[in-house]
């Protein structure tokens, strides 16, 4: 369904080319300071405009519809909407007969008997990550407010691009910033040279690139998560895999742990009860252990590419060649650090309110 969480419940709605998209949050504590200006920084980090991102530029201005009065949350459901104004729906008419490889065109049609909205990918579009980012701003406020949780306030949830097109960040540019707050579309125009060259080559070939995003929560108290079904990894994974285009997730040493010995992977415990290294990524037994929570997310290359691909033409009943036109990201993962942060904050805020 379209709702995540038990205490902090987040529901998204709308389609890429509909009148608007938005989010409803239930369980938001009363008394949080909140204005439309609070959303600007994270929305800017998700915005298109850098090389390799879609030419579709939207204003992305949030409108708080309910749940805020005189600058504070009321405790009632909080609703935020965003208008869609820059749409080219005719670019998608072909995909009803010739579904795009790697996209949700075919699965959506099969599930809903061709009743889905195909324009811009409809409800499956990355456009729907915008209200997710808005919900993440609210979740971060919940996590950062020590009076709400009676715990050490969070220092933040920080995500950045670790690898792009198979090129690791430090291999591309040793001086590249790891500050997530700088990874706006404007900043990415000054990305490492090897990344720029890889994106240029993909654009020239009519192809696309994937990327790996690393996310860290540096100051998180022990005790988040429940053993088994509601472990902190399971809860975060549920949220992260809801982001369109995610193909993998690993905590700490991740898959490398399968190639290690126990003596190599185990984290020694210090006198303060905290791990002395962090191969576990801040989690033992599904519960945070006081070390930084750290994981990496793999994003696939954009499915909509100009390079010719084979697909079945349901009008002619034959295999056909599809050449996609329109406006699409060469590497949509450039815009996802803010989305990964948002999903992480949403998951942790829900767990925090459950504690």
Image: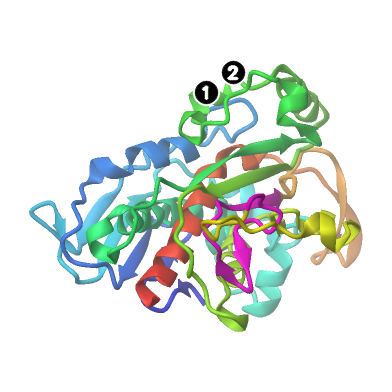
| Residue 263 location (% of width, % of height) | 83, 59
Is residue 200 among the parts visible in the rendering? no
**In the image, which disc is placed on residue 190?**
2
Instruction: Check if residue 115 falls in the magenta segment.
Output: no
Which of 308 and 231 lies nearest the eye of the viewer?
231
Local secondary structure at mark 1: helix
**Relative side of 196 to 42, left or right:** right
* 139 w.r.t. 190: above or below: below
**Relative side of 304 to 147, left or right:** right
**Relative side of 180 to 260, left or right:** left
The residue lying at 76 percent from left, 21 percent from top is 194
Q: Residue furthest left?
A: 70
Is residue 287 among the parts visible in the rendering? yes
Which of 250 and 218 lies nearest the eye of the viewer?
218
| Residue 55 location (% of width, % of height) | 56, 32
**In the image, which disc is placed on residue 187?**
1
Identify the image quadrant of residue 232: bottom right
Tell me which segment is drawn in magenta. 276-298
Which of 104 and 135 lies nearest the eye of the viewer?
135
The residue lying at 19 percent from left, 70 percent from top is 75
Tag 2–tag 1 contact (CB < 8 Å): yes
**In the image, which disc is placed on residue 216?**
none
- Spatial separation of the CA atoms under disc 2 and disc 1: 6 Å
| Residue 73 location (% of width, % of height) | 18, 61
Q: Quadrant of the C terminus?
A: bottom left
Label 2: few (<14), some (14–19) or many (≥20) C-alpha neighbours in 10 Å: some
The residue lying at 52 percent from left, 36 percent from top is 56
The residue lying at 75 percent from left, 41 percent from top is 305
Identify the image quadrant of residue 324: top right
Which of 267 and 214 lies nearest the eye of the viewer?
267
Label 1: few (<14), some (14–19) or many (≥20) C-alpha neighbours in 10 Å: few
């Amino acid at each position: 369904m379209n709702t995540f969480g038990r205490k902090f419940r987040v529901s998204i709605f709308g389609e890429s080319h509909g009148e608007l998209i938005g989010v409803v949050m239930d369980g938001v504590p009363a008394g949080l300071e909140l204005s439309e200006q609070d959303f600007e920084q994270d929305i800017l980090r998700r915005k298109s405009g850098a090389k390799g991102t879609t030419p579709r530029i939207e204003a992305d201005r949030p409108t708080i519809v309910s749940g805020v009065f005189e600058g504070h949350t009321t405790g009632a459901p909080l609703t935020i909407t965003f208008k869609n104004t820059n749409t080219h729906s005719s670019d998608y008419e072909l995909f009803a007969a010739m579904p795009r490889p790697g996209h949700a065109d075919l699965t959506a049609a099969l599930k809903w008997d061709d009743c889905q909205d195909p324009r811009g990918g409809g409800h499956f579009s990355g456009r729907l990550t915008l209200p997710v980012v808005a919900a993440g701003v609210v979740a971060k406020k919940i996590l950062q407010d020590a009076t709400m949780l009676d715990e050490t306030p969070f220092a933040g949830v920080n995500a950045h691009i670790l690898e792009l097109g198979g090129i690791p960040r430090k291999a591309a540019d040793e001086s590249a910033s790891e500050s997530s707050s700088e990874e706006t579309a404007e900043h990415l125009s000054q990305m490492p040279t090897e990344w720029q060259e890889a994106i240029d080559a993909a654009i020239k070939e009519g192809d696309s690139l994937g990327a790996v995003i690393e996310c860290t929560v540096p100051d998180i108290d022990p005790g988040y998560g429940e053993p088994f079904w509601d472990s902190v990894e399971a809860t975060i994974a549920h949220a992260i895999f809801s982001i369109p285009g995610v193909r993998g997730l690993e905590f700490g040493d991740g898959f490398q742990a399968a190639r290690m010995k126990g003596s190599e992977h185990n984290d020694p415990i210090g006198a303060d009860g905290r791990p002395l290294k962090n191969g576990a990524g801040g989690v033992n037994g599904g519960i945070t252990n006081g070390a930084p929570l750290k994981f990496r997310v793999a994003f696939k290359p954009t499915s909509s590419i100009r390079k010719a691909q084979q697909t079945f033409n349901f009008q002619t009943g034959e295999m056909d060649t599809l050449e996609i036109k329109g406006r699409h990201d060469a590497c949509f993962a450039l815009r996802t650090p803010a989305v990964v942060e948002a999903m992480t904050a949403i998951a942790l805020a829900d767990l925090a309110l459950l504690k």
